[in-house]
Image (spheres, rainbow, N blue to C red):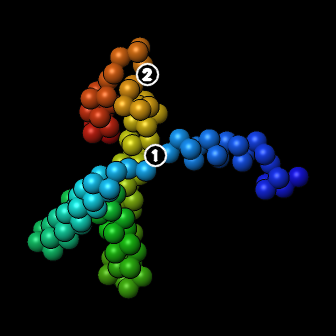
Amino acid sequence: RGISGDTETARKAETVRQAFKRPAWWVLIFGWSLAACAGIVNSVSFRCFGHFVSHATGSTTSIALGIEGVSHGRHGWEQPADAAKLLASFLVGAFACGLLIDKNQVHIGGKALYGAALVGNALL
């Protein structure tokens, strides 16, 4: 039996789809505005100081620019490797927080330790 004939999978997918609630329009506009501001800050900081200030997008851009620099013989693999390590450490920390926090509540001992989980993420 193929994937399309799997009614259990289709039922689970429909349950997940129904649980998703589209954010309000003002939340989307606010999110887009924050993303635009982050991009502007990242671009200006790179142009002025030679460093990205954002975690994921700046590191990803740095990896791409590093690979491009390696392909043109400007430098070795150290620069893109350092950016990849930075991105990997952010993703591991975000993943760890995601394991601890479900719907804004930490499930260790029944107490909401959201702040402690964020501090732990920052220390990574």
Residue 91, image x, y percentages: 41, 48
Q: For this view, does 77 lie left or right of residue 55?
A: right
Give the quadrant of residue 123: top left
Crowdedness of circle 2 by 10 Å Cα count: few (<14), some, many (20+)? some
CA–CA distance in space, label 1 to label 2: 24 Å
Between 12 and 108, the one nearer to me in the picture: 12
Residue 63, image x, y percentages: 37, 68
Helix, strand, or loop for circle 1?
loop
Q: Are marks 1 and 2 in contact (CB under 8 Å)?
A: no
Q: Considering only vertical position in the picture, is 50 above or below 120?
A: below
Q: Give the residue at x 27% y 54%.
A: 26
The residue identified by callout 2 is: 107
Between 105 and 116, the one nearer to me in the picture: 105
* Residue 51 in view (yes/no): no
Residue 96, image x, y percentages: 43, 36
Helix, strand, or loop for circle 2?
loop
Between 74 and 118, the one nearer to me in the picture: 118
Q: Give the residue at x 38% y 26%.
A: 105
Crowdedness of circle 1 by 10 Å Cα count: few (<14), some, many (20+)? few
The residue identified by callout 1 is: 21
* Residue 29 in view (yes/no): yes
Q: Considering only vertical position in the picture, is 120 above or below 19?
A: above
Q: Give the residue at x 33% y 69%.
A: 61
Residue 21, image x, y percentages: 46, 46
Give the quadrant of residue 113: top left
Q: For this view, does 46 lie left or right of residue 15?
A: left
Q: Give the residue at x 44% y 31%.
A: 102
For badge 2, the amino acid type reads: His
For badge 1, the amino acid type reads: Lys
